[in-house]
Amino acid sequence: MVDKKTNEQLLFEIAGLKKRIFELEKLETDGEKIKKDLEKSRDFFINLFEEFPALIWRANTDGKCDYFNKNWLAFTGRTIEEEFGDGWTKGVHKDDFDRCLDIYLTSFKARKQFEMEYRLLHNTGEYRWILDLGMPFYDLDGDFAGYIGSCYDITKKKELLKQLEKSLEEKDLLLKEIHHRAKNNLMIISSLLNIQSTYIKDKESQEIFKESQNRARSMAIIHERLYQSVNLKKIDFSDYIRTLSSELFHAYVDDSARIRLEINLDAIFLDINLAIPLGLIINELITNSLKHGFPEGRSGKITINFHEKENLYELIVEDNGIGFPEKLDFQNTPSLGLQIVNSLADQIDGEIYLDRSQGTVFTITFKKSKYV
């Protein structure tokens, strides 16, 4: 009976050993399979890096490069042994070296990806512009394992950008010259009108010439500001209003103490397509106040307000003079100046309001979204 149990026990132990041997053999087989899979993956990625259409490099944990793909070596014309470690830096242009080294070391220390451009010596002996994109990578345990980077030749892109910049610079110079000539032509017209007016004895006709002269000058000032400005499309309109109103006061007011000018303006830059019609509107409204608001030596004040209100611009030109005639419809008048104001307000899709309760207050509002 004892022998029988012993035999059963032996058989059980043998079966257990066989199972264990099978498991070990399976583990060994699985291990070999994993090893082979890893080798295949490694070979796959090495081949991928070798065939990838970029210059690939890799640095280990101390920042020294230990791999360059064949595209890198073909680009530089050097051996991988020559490029190892810091050898590749010998090909970096001396004017870019310090900047690139600083970016690389700062990023490496912070374990952050980086992007930098520099000139690298090509196998032809010329320097070419390179865009270098580097990023840290980590092993299966999550430990920092170094950096890997891909580089692209952007020389043609750089040359194209340089050509575009030169073209834009030439265009800016041309636009400046156009504004300069437009200003000169308008000033010539203004001067001719002034000269012609000296031969006219009729006071009303002289006034017509004077107003036309001021209209030409109002446009000339805009072109002058654009010629002097860095931005050839927009001008500082608050500065323009101050200049224009000052010149109009000089033309119409003999005693500067009699009529005061108050200006309240936001710092607004306007497109030339808006600045010219709006400048002419301001010219007409200020002229109207100076000519008709303060007769017989009456004193007073003219106020100009120009502000942004949500999606609107608001221009207010007001005076505390004798007021706009009650029976006169400002939108249907023989006055050329007010006809110009109404026509230009329609041109900029503006709305005009007239308040006669205290002096004369013209308010013009228009949407700024159209001109931003």
Image (cartoon, rainbow, N blue to C red):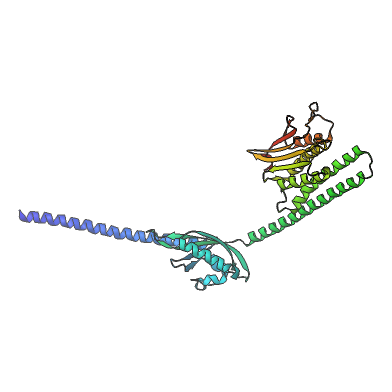
Q: Is residue 298 above or below residue 179?
A: above
Direction from residue 360 to residue 37 in the image, left or right: left
Which is nearer the eye, 24 or 88?
88
To which quarter of the image does residue 162 belong?
A: bottom right
Where residue 23 appears, as percent x and y from the top left, is: 26, 57
Q: Is residue 52 above or below residue 124?
A: above
Using the rendered image of the protein, determine whether residue 122 is visible from the camera's viewpoint. no
Q: Name the residue: 55% across, 72% down.
A: 90
Direction from residue 246 to residue 55 in the image, left or right: left
Q: Is residue 44 above or below residue 219?
A: below
Q: Name the residue: 77% across, 34% down.
A: 321
Count of picture labels: 0
Task: Report the residue that reaches farthest toward the top.
Answer: 327
Q: State the quadrant of the C terminus.
A: top right
Which is nearer the eye, 147 or 54?
147
Where residue 56 appears, as percent x and y from the top left, is: 52, 63
Q: Name the residue: 63% across, 59% down.
A: 157
Task: Report the residue that reaches farthest toward the bottom.
Answer: 82
Q: Name the residue: 70% across, 36% down.
A: 365
Using the rendered image of the protein, determine whether residue 168 is visible from the camera's viewpoint. yes
Which is nearer the eye, 142 or 46?
142
Which is nearer the eye, 113 or 85?
113
Task: Report the residue that reaches farthest toward the left.
Answer: 1
Q: Is residue 277 above or below residue 59?
A: above
Where residue 61 appears, as percent x and y from the top left, is: 43, 66
To which quarter of the image does residue 173 belong?
A: bottom right
Where residue 207 appears, as percent x and y from the top left, is: 88, 39
To which quarter of the image does residue 254 belong?
A: top right
